Amino acid sequence: MDLIFNCPKCEQELAVDSSGSGEEIDCPNCGETLVIPQPNSPDVKTSTGPVPTVQIDGNDGEPQVVNAIASSAAAKVKMHLKVPVTSKPAEKLIAKPLAPLEVAAKESDRKMRVKTIRHVDCVEVGHDRFDDVVTDFLAKIGETNIISINPVNYSYLELGSQKELTDYGLVIVFKA
Ligand SMILES: [Zn+2]
């Protein structure tokens, strides 16, 4: 329901939502601070239908809409006052955000993969980094993506001694 009343200073006719009763607004026409009257005040008309937001009596007595700037200013006042009426708990705070399409696509695109880590490949200048390499790799793919970790033995020809040596490693099956 809209309240229709006149600015006490400039007589500008104003229409605001009745929920704004008692609130202070600035007259969009003259800037005077005024209090929105109660719907049952004697000087107030009410309307439930659409009404021009700003009207002024013309010379012929017919209501005329004043200039566009004043109209839009009144419209803003009206919008502002309607906020308390339409405000509801923010639903977005409750609803879970949907996963972005990009992420969803990646989920379905993920494939089974295999990583073989050989112990011999992790020895650098007599420094055994096998545990570090495995730890780093597992951290990189993430625990939830690990499907299985299997120990393997293999033999290889050591270049220096030209001997066939047996060593160990891991075969890691994961999703990525
Ligand atoms: Zn005024």
Image (cartoon, rainbow, N blue to C red):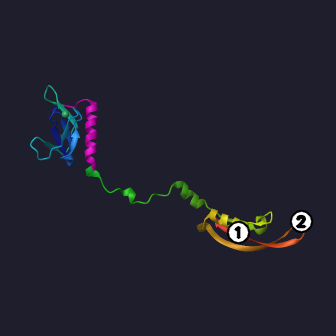
Which comes sooner in the sequence, label 2 or label 1? Answer: 1
Q: Residue at x 73, y 67 (%)?
A: 130
Above or below: residue 56 compared with residue 166: above
- Segment tinted magenta in the rendering: 64-83
Does the magenta segment cover residue 66?
A: yes
Q: Residue furthest left?
A: 42
Q: Name the quadrant of the C terminus.
A: bottom right
| Residue lying furthest top | 59
| In this rendering, position of residue 169 left or right of residue 58 | right
Residue 50 seen in this snapshot: no
Are circles 2 and 1 on residues that touch, CB within 8 Å? no
Total count of labels:
2
Residue type at tag 1: Asp
Classify mark 2: residues with Cα within 10 Å, few (<14), some (14-19) or many (20+).
few
Q: Nearer the viewer, residue 49 or 21?
A: 21
Magenta: main secondary structure equals helix
Q: Identify the residue under disc 1.
A: 131
* Label placed on residue 116: none
Residue drawn at 25 percent across, 45 percent down = 81
Instruction: Kindly indicate the quadrant of the structure image that contains residue 17.
Output: top left
- Indicate the quadrant of ligand 1 in the picture: top left
How many angstroms separate mark 2 from mark 1 (CA)?
24 Å
The one of 80 and 108 positioned closer to us in this rendering: 80
Q: Which is nearer the eye, 102 or 43?
A: 43
Residue indicated by mark 2: 160
Q: Position of residue 144 (x, y in %)?
A: 58, 68
Tell me if the residue at label 1 has its CB under 8 Å from ligand 1: no
